[in-house]
Amino acid sequence: MTRFVSMPRLRHPLAAAALLLAAQGACAAVSFDYIGQAVLSTSTTFAGTRVGGLSGIDYDAATQTYVAISDDRSQYNPAHYYRMTLDYSQFSRSNTAGTAGVQFTGVTTLRDPQGEPFGLNRVDGESIRLVRGANGPTLLWTNEGQRTGAGFQNPTLREAYLDGTHAREFSVPQTYLPVGTPGGQAAGDSGIRNNLAFESLTLSADGKSAYVATESALAQDGGIATVDAGTQVRIARFDYASGQRNAEYVYQLDAIPTAPVGGGSADNGLVELLAVGEGRLLALERSYAAGVGNNIRLYLTDTAGATDVAGLSSLAGAGFASMQKTLLLDLGTLVNADGSALKLDNVEGLTWGADHNGEKTLLLVSDNNFSGGQFTQFIALGIHGDLAVTPVPEPSTYALMLGGVALLAWQRRRAAVQR
């Protein structure tokens, strides 16, 4: 296994050296092992379903199994989620990794409030979390919603029983409901943008709160991310018992990190959250640039010191403090056993995983969009350090501070040589 401490790429050698010192010192509290991966082709099937679109995943420690939701909009099979086991010891640090270590054990159809399977294009499941409550286990899951010329659908946060039947629906504020034109760019438009809505979901460690985030900015809050600028994403906190939103914060989404080739398409979005501690969350950003591929970055973010913007119908022109944010890992730095860079697909799901060789793990999964040119990818990472206790310093802060120290040392050495 190879261990990584995340660092941004810096062109100046002195700045790079300074940041390396920072990473070896203060940042050494949190690092990652790339344990390995397993890969499924888009032709994979299970129990009569076409396996794909795995947009969210969660680990059930009580049964040592995983649940994963498919974003199949009942196009191939009725909207559903899977049960599976994952054996990291069979994963491989190779771009030619196969299916070893992945075993599907069940598939369950999700049902609407009337008890029926969802019809075609009536739901878009994106994230899933298992809740072990006093009355038995249930599932929280998000439906992204829709904003197209074919019609508008509100985003939803729902709870279901393990058999897929509907239990209840949380109360999503008016701020998120699509109003106006299908494009969401006209004056007065508000609510979610199409395919950029309820992508992220996590349950707090004490089980009292659920955090839900949109993938990009709401129509009234600003534009989507570009190569030149990021955007503002809302993270809503819901009280689990009442189903009501009780706070809301702003997360600053990165600009698209790499320009597309030949003027092709490119995007960036917040695709998953995972609770670490009180108000502390892991945030997974996923970008794609045509001709380049996917860029996946893992951040640590915190609501401490951030403004509760629940009362703001629009963020445009408003004054507020955003959530703190620190880069933990750029998955583009992960290296296979043969020295090649790990090829990344459309990674969207994130969960704590089973312990591996005595260390805590993260498990990520990709949504293959049911495309023959993509694949379903499970990536296992070992964690060293306590994310809930030890904050990782902002790389830019250390680059500035230690960069100056390194420059001064270099200048002194040069002067000594000249003398």
Image (spheres, grey):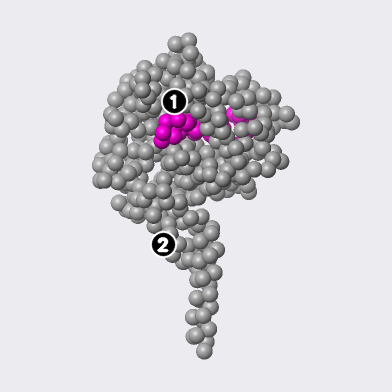
Give the percent coordinates (x, y) of residue 47: 32, 20
Instruction: Report the residue marked by disc 2.
Output: 25
Q: Nearer the viewer, residue 22 or 363?
A: 22
- Decide whether residue 193 is among the magenta residues: yes
Residue drawn at x 64%, y 22% as measured from the top left? 149
Q: Is residue 209 left or right of residue 188?
A: left
Q: Which residues are magenta?
A: 191-219
Mark pair 2, 1: CA separation: 40 Å
Q: Is residue 418 above or below residue 20?
A: below
Q: Is residue 149 above or below residue 347?
A: above
- Element type where label 2 sits in the image: loop
Residue drawn at x 49%, y 40% as measured from the top left? 279
Q: Is residue 116 above or below residue 359?
A: above
Residue drawn at x 44%, y 25% as measured from the top left? 140
Q: Amino acid at mark 2?
A: Gly
- Decide whether residue 342 is among the magenta residues: no
Give the percent coordinates (x, y) of residue 123: 51, 21
Q: Is residue 337 left or right of residue 395?
A: left
| Badge 2 density bin: few <14, some 14–19, many ≥20, Cα 10 Å | few
Q: Is residue 346 visible?
A: no
Residue drawn at x 47%, y 37% as measured from the top left? 273
Residue 132: name its quadrant: top left
Give the percent coordinates (x, y) of residue 334: 39, 50
Between discs 2 and 1, the one toward the N terminus:
2
Q: Is residue 65 left or right of residue 402?
A: left
Residue ranking furthest to the bottom: 419
- Element type where label 1 sits in the image: strand
Q: Is residue 243 visible?
A: yes
Q: Amino acid at mark 1?
A: Leu
Give the percent coordinates (x, y) of residue 371: 45, 31
Q: Nearer the viewer, residue 234 or 263?
A: 234
Instruction: Report the residue marked by disc 1.
Output: 140
